[in-house]
Amino acid sequence: MLTKESLIEAKKSTNEAILKIKQKYSCNPESKKIIFVVEGKDDIPYYATKCESFLPDGWRIEIINAFNRKKVVEAYKKLDWNTYNKARILFFIDRDLSDYTGEETPTDDNCYVTSKYSIENDLCTVETYLKTVRFYYNLEDIDEKDEAALSNFYQSCWSEFEKFSVVLMAEILFWKTNKISSNYSNFKIQNVFTIHENSLNLNGEYSDEKALLKAFCKQSGLPFGNENLISYIAYLNKLHTPFEFIRGKYIIAFFVKLLKYTAMHSDTILISKRKAKDSIGIGYEDCIVKLCGIMSIPTSLNSFFKTMKEKLLS
């Protein structure tokens, strides 16, 4: 019997990205269209913006949102590369925790894999923070002392954020390596911490590690297991730094909350005591969309787009 729930599940299991690739791809050698396949809607404006300067004259891109990493990888695997030209279909894949779990990640010329957990890790940096404050908060002419104060504030808050985020990532790694299915994307990390008097602190109900993990498990649809995560934390730190392996969505939450606080309390951070004026109103859902213009392009992506251009012209 067909139900609304079964139809929803059927749609989720169908990889519409493969169908869309087949519909949009042109076998005509004169075609000047290139297809990008990405994991989510936040990827679209960033990759579209950053590739523009690399596109040869007359070429255009079409971007297909596959909606998750698994479907991007599946689309790459299921296409017959004897039929399709790899130079005209490019895949953009987040590394996630694949270095730790062995999760399948294609290594091909037409696959860009982020150097860190996700593209957000490369974008939501102290450099982007400083640019945002200067260009969008009416503080474009602040001096080096004010910039240093902002950088110190960012790093101080990051140090506290990193401490509990690493614990959450260790729990995720435990689940992944033990094949435990969880809905950790449901967890709203922005509710866990507050920035007050220029310091980042856990909110009361999350104030110790056990309470934090209990809430994390509950919101992820799992019972609290009280696992010993020491070895998982050590393994995470062995291969990458926290800024490289912490989930991109968590970094977005940190970044946006820091910007919101700065907009309201710049006079307590800056040596000059100047007041900021927020002209952009960045939120958790539109951070990449609104800031992609000032976000730098990672070296690895720059090289990928250069190679793309060379192949399109060859």
Image (tube, grey):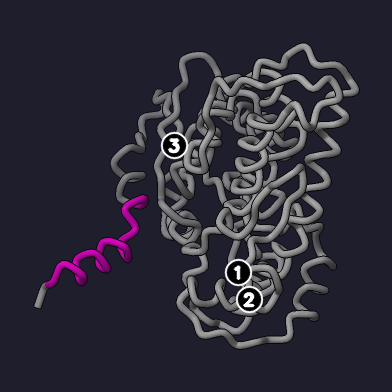
Vertical side of 132 occupied by 239: above or below: below
Label 3 neighbour load within 10 Å: few <14, some 14-19, many 20+: many
Q: Which residue carries the number 3 mark? A: 35
Q: Earlier in the sequence, mark 2 or mark 1?
A: 1
Of residues 173 and 100, the one nearer the viewer is 173
Q: Which residue carries the number 1 mark? A: 205
Q: Could you say which disc has been placed on residue 45 in the image?
A: none
Secondary structure beneath label 2:
helix
Q: Amino acid at mark 3?
A: Ile
Vertical side of 39 occupied by 15: above or below: below
Please give the range of residues in magenta. 3-18
Asked which quadrant contains residue 314, the reply is top right
**What percent of the width, then of the height, locates residue 285?**
47, 42
> Going by the image, does 221 lie left or right of 245?
left
Q: Which residue carries the number 2 mark? A: 211
The answer to whether the residues at label 2 and label 1 have Cβ atoms under 8 Å apart is yes
Q: Earlier in the sequence, mark 1 or mark 3?
A: 3
Secondary structure beneath label 3:
strand
Of residues 54 and 189, the one nearer the viewer is 189
Q: Earlier in the sequence, mark 2 or mark 3?
A: 3
Q: Residue at x 79, y 32 (%)?
A: 269
Of residues 62 and 175, the one nearer the viewer is 175
Q: CA distance from mark 2 to mark 1?
A: 7 Å
Q: CA distance from mark 1 to mark 3?
A: 46 Å
**What percent of the width, then of the height, locates residue 172?**
62, 72
Q: Amino acid at mark 2?
A: Ala
Vertical side of 34 occupied by 23: above or below: below
**What percent of the width, then of the height, locates residue 242?**
77, 58
Vertical side of 263 occupied by 154: above or below: below
Q: CA distance from mark 2 to mark 3?
A: 45 Å
Label 1 neighbour load within 10 Å: few <14, some 14-19, many 20+: few
Q: Is residue 107 visible?
A: no
